[in-house]
Amino acid sequence: TEPGAQPPPSVPLPSKTEPGAQPPPSVPLPSKTEPGAQPPPSDIAEDEVTRNIVIEGLGIEGLFIDDGPRDGLGEKERKPSIWAGLEWSGYYRNETAYRYREPRSVTKMRSTLYLDARYPITDNVGLFAAGWAYYDLAYDLFNYNTIAARSERNDEEPLVFVERLDEEKDSNVIDLRELYADFLLEGLDLRIGKQFIVWGVLEGVRIVDEINPIDFRELINLDLLDYRIPLWSVKLDYFREDTSYQLVWIPDLRFHKPAPRGSEWELLQNICIGQAAEILCADSSPESWTLRDSELGVKMDTYLWDTELSFSYFYTWDDFPVVFRSIRVDDNNIPPAFYPTYTRIHMFGTTAVKQLGRYILKGEASFVTGKYFGTKNTTDRDGNGYLDDDGELLRKHIRWGLGVEFNILGMDVASGIAQWIILDYEDEIMQDRFDTSVNLFVRKELPEQAAVFQMLAIYLVSLKEILLKPEITFQFSDNLQMGVGLDLFYGLKSDLGGSQAVRAGASVFDPNAARAQFIGNFNNNDRIYFDFKYSF
């Protein structure tokens, strides 16, 4: 869907409006879930939650009640409604954001209506559906170019280049988030449909948890349950004593979704869109709903040495395409050619959770084969004048992460570290051998003010970038809450060489680009936001 740039974080981006980098692999994603809290079953189907769901209400026998007299009095027993067991809930939410850096503007006035419903067919079979619709009024009240800060984001490009950029909007959206059937048997649970499947234990860190792709429509600012893209899947859980086994089959192929083209969060775009006419670009994607291209995963959960352990294997696709490319390293005037291609990867993972007194220790690790890493665009070891290895090297790598959760001075604290390590590393690879991030999450309840304060901090060590997200939420009733917070970005912007590209023939790609960044590209997007939510 969005063959964006495969090159990892340190790969030079071809243009601010073109791809060239994926998020740093160890970057944790924001979460508004307090440490240790489990997401609700409607969004994340943990094994234990699924196993213990009790579907009450109308059984199948209730559809065939005798309609005759009761107790001989001629009174007819009232037939229960077929919808007697239906349970539904939802919320209305308004998010308004104001960017206080130039050009100052309201950048979001999004209203969202979310609904979900559970319906028991029998005591062992149930249906669940959830969806949302949202509309952003900011696009109707304010100029698109001002909202997107295009002249500032593309200050190195000529005006004619800025004026021809796309103007896609993240608005007027209706989406079915979940639709699945649960079949609960003795020792066996089966879930079929559109769903979320989570394997990790470190919230927001994708080490083992690679099943659902990410929606980057607001970079990584979305809530924990909102940034995941649901997939049509089959999930089978088998339980035996203290051990459970899970089999996952995913015929629905979707990949990371970039922000709308031209928006203030534009990054990781399809490299073939917007290229100059003289540049060859041919992308290819695997097909959904075929057995050959399906994804397959198996996982075992057990309890040993007072520790919750899991072991998993996932045969999947890299959610970022590998951008194979043909480039003359000795002549920038010859247009390059791009061949973005999705590739298969194998992931062998493990997780652990252990409580030591008031501390909860969490860990994840995975060994990944089949992944390509981008090389510097000047690499020509054989001296033939062309970029070696089509700009990509196949390497194994290790991912690991450690986290600790505890309570101190009435505050819930969760901190962690995550890292990627590339094996058989070569200096030509653009991503660092060790790519590290650290994160800190703090949550403090303020009962006298009926409020909760929380803050998330992420530091990308290799890129020297920081994301800060402080927020305070006031709970006016069980149904109504209002919050205010900040999104703060620190770091350097990517050095893209846009002016050189234009002089080289209107190309949006510069093979001598110096540096690719992630969070730093949005250091002028600092904003304050207001969040109103009414649940029902």
Image (spheres, rainbow, N blue to C red):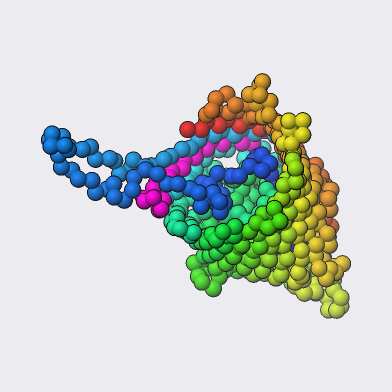
Residue drawn where x is 64% and y is 63% of the image: 312
Residue 173 location in percent, x, y?
A: 51, 45
The answer, for residue 438, to whether it is visible in the render is yes
Residue drawn where x is 76% and y is 54% of the image: 401
Residue 85 horizontal side relative to residue 182, left or right? left
Q: In the picture shown, does residue 465 fall above or below 389?
A: above
Magenta segment, prevailing SS (helix, strand or loop)? strand
Along the line of sight, which residue is nearer the eye, 115 or 215?
115
Along the line of sight, which residue is nearer the eye, 361 or 452?
361
Q: In the picture shown, does residue 486 fall above or below 517?
A: above
Residue 255 location in percent, x, y?
A: 60, 59
* Residue 121 within the magenta-colored segment of the rendering: yes
Residue 190 location in percent, x, y?
A: 47, 59
Which segment is the magenta one?
Answer: 105-126
Q: In the picture shown, does residue 468 fall above or below 274?
A: above
Residue drawn where x is 71% and y is 31% of the image: 444
Which residue ends up furthest to the top in the rendered image?
448
* Residue 200 within the magenta-colored segment of the rendering: no
Along the line of sight, which residue is nearer the eye, 380 or 31?
31
The answer, for residue 283, to whether it is visible in the render is no
- The quarter in which the N terminus is drawn is bottom right
Residue 135 location in percent, x, y?
A: 52, 39
Residue drawn where x is 66% and y is 39% of the image: 34
Along the line of sight, which residue is nearer the eye, 84 or 114?
84
Q: In the picture shown, does residue 57 fall above or below 210?
A: above
Hey, which quadrant is residue 3 in on the image? bottom right
Residue 130 horizontal side relative to residue 377, left or right? left
